[in-house]
Image (cartoon, rainbow, N blue to C red):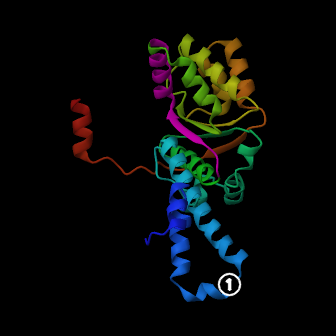
Amino acid sequence: MLKNPTTDKMLALRLPVFAEAFQAQLGRPEFADLDFAERVGMLVDAEWSAREQRSQQRRLKAAKLRHQACLEDIQWATVRNLDRSVILSLGACGFIRDHRNLLITGATGVGKSYLACAFAERACRSGYTSYYIRAPRLYHELAVSRADGSYGRLLQKLARTDLLVIDDWGLAPLQETERRELLEIVEDRHQNASTIITSQLPVKAWYEAIGDPTLADAICDRLIPGAYKIHIKGPSMRPPRSAADRTSAEAE
């Protein structure tokens, strides 16, 4: 990039793409036919687009998605019970704007985690913050944060995230501490942010999985009413394990 006082000032103002586009205009005679407003608009668009792309990449990195998933790559096999119009409608992120939850259920391997990550990826591309975490890891991080004094900061982070994805919920019975922590999380987010829950358990079995009737009522009352529900059917989409893999697993 050629240096002159104007571009130096643009760089000092942290407008690198603006400065680069400005230099490109100076070096190409076809821009001389455009009026002043058009040329300035093109410079502003270049800087704005670059900043939006960087922001999007930061959101995607912070989301820590398990899969590099996107709604455009979903396989629309009818046996999986996926309604294309419903998925694409949810992909417009209106449920996030309206602070409604999304509950995705189905057997292991049918694509629950992928679909949840695809919604989170779309949210990041649409300007929302997302965060993905498996339920066992969530409870572990909460326990660690209580020990090191960062518990309050972690709860604030979870509360501020526009779309929180809790994957593999209900794999094991909840302990008393885990029930209360889950209630804290869903209470903070209730009517303020959206949560995606994926689970092998049907929604009607969640009360029993939580264990304590009082806490189950409180948790489910903040998750289920008004939530969108997707139940995925069909065979597992995971590749079959080889004989060597099964032998190794049995040896362990």
Q: In the rendered image, which residue does mark 1 sit on? A: 34
Q: Nearer the viewer, residue 49 or 193?
A: 49
Residue 246, position as x, y percentages in the image: 27, 40
Residue 234 seen in the current view? yes
Q: Identify whether 185 is placed above or below 99.
A: above
Q: Secondary structure at mark 1?
A: loop
Q: Amino acid at mark 1?
A: Leu
Q: Which quadrant of the figure contains the N terminus?
A: bottom left
Q: Nearer the viewer, residue 58 or 48?
A: 48
Residue 177, position as x, y percentages in the image: 55, 12
Q: Nearer the viewer, residue 251 or 125?
A: 125
Residue beneath the point at 61% across and 19% down: 210
Residue 50 lies in quadrant: bottom right
Q: Is residue 102 left or right of residue 175?
A: right
Q: Is residue 212 magenta?
A: no
Residue 181, position as x, y percentages in the image: 59, 18
Residue beneath the point at 58% across and 53% down: 80
Q: Nearer the viewer, residue 105 or 129?
A: 129
Q: Identify whether 42 is placed above or below 123.
A: below
Q: Identify whether 27 is placed above or below 228.
A: below
Q: Identify whether 56 is placed above or below 96.
A: below
Q: Which residues are magenta?
A: 127-147
Q: Residues within 10 Å of mark 1 (few under 14, many from 20)?
A: few
Residue 151, position as x, y percentages in the image: 53, 18
Q: Is residue 222 left or right of residue 81?
A: right
Q: Which quadrant of the figure contains the C terminus?
A: top left
Dominant SS type (magenta): helix
Residue beneath the point at 53% across and 64% down: 17
Residue beneath the point at 55% across and 72% down: 22
Q: Is residue 143 magenta?
A: yes
